[in-house]
Image (tube, grey):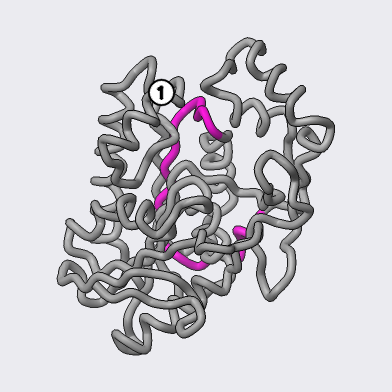
Amino acid sequence: MERTELERDGFIGCFFSGTRRPDMAVIRAGDLNESMEQALESSQFLIDAGFTVLVLCLCPEGRRSAVPAEYAEHAVKWLRERLGENIRTAMTGTSGGALYTLTCACFIPEIVCAAVCSPFDHMMEGTAGRRPAGSSVISRGGGDMPFTPWDVLRKGSAGAFVKGLFSKGYGPHRLPRYIFDINGTVPESALPLEKMNCDILILASENDDVLPAEEAARRIEEAIRTPDYPHLVVTRIYEHGSHILGCTISEKRMNKVSRSLKAWRLRPKECAEALADSQRLIIEFFDRASMI
């Protein structure tokens, strides 16, 4: 394993050399609030499968609200310098890591394969605790991207959370989804998916407890699955899965998840099966992706 440094390399990451696909390296983006150690844990299934993996930490110590897209640009450059100009770059992430992966796939042409799990297709405003940050959660070129503001939090986060606790279909284990649903999005915050030029795997679960990932997955597929899109597009929406897809999760974190997400409380067996299947699909997708 080789660690990179923000000041020296432009991003914080851990690199693992593998032999499964010598022509490909996988950037696995951690969630927007994951430490390096958590991002490593989440990426373990790819490392164990034998891929060459660069685990990208999006939450280095001292980071402000906005996560620079330049982290991934520097990571791609770093991989090409280490592995050669002909190396193909795939990218994957879950939740906030999926938003980051989608964003990078729109703007970094070297990313020729992507797997997004529990994704969202609109750029949202960042937050500081429960307070809106006034800037996009991901930045590009040193500035904000067009984003949907958290108007519902500006009107009073305490009141919004209390309403979510007692709203039918939500409750204490679905508060994040409640905030997403009542806040909505603005059209200009939609990611420019038409700029993508890569094979893509889209994974989500129906009635996601955290964000409307299943709705976003269908919009992503509809936007790019056109006669003119020349690349592989695969979508899987689990009927009884959860927000936790496409990652490795320890028993300790699993216990926390099982207490906090309604899907795991109601259907732990089905959620665990969906998680395992999502790992399998990502591995198979990276194995057969054309990488052209």
Q: Where is residue 243 in the image (x, y as percent from the top left)?
A: 44, 35
Q: Residue furthest front?
A: 62
Residue at the (84%, 32%) spot, across then down:
155
Q: What element carries label 1?
A: helix
In the image: residue 134, left or right of residue 129: right
Asked if residue 287 is among those painted magenta in the image, a careful observer would answer no
Q: What residue type is labelled 1?
A: Arg
Residue at the image point whose x is 50% and y is 29% from the top: 208
Q: In this view, does 217 lie to the left or right of 166?
A: left
Crowd class of label 1 (few under 14; some 14 to 19; many from 20; radius 10 Å): few
Closer to us: 279 or 56: 56
Q: Quadrant of residue 196?
A: bottom right
Q: Mark 1 points at which residue?
A: 259
User: Can residue 12 be spotted in the picture?
Assistant: yes
The residue range painted magenta reads 191-210
Taking the spot 25% from the left edge, 77% from the top edge, the residue there is 23
Q: Can residue 200 be seen in this view?
A: no
Q: Tell me the quarter of the picture where residue 56 sits.
A: bottom left
**What residue do we see at 38% from left, 55% from top?**
39
Above or below, 211 against 100 in this view is above
**At which x and y percent is residue 36?**
40, 59
The tally of labels here is 1
Location of residue 205 (image quadrant) = top left
Q: In which quarter of the image is the C terminus?
A: bottom left
Please provide percent x and percent y for residue 263: 42, 22
Quarter of the image with the N terminus is bottom left
Compared to 101, does 245 lie above or below?
above
Q: Where is residue 171 drawn, in percent x and y?
A: 58, 16
Please tell me whether residue 155 is drawn above or below residue 113 in the rendered image: above
Q: Please state which of residues 128 and 282 is positioned toward the viewer in this rendering.
A: 128
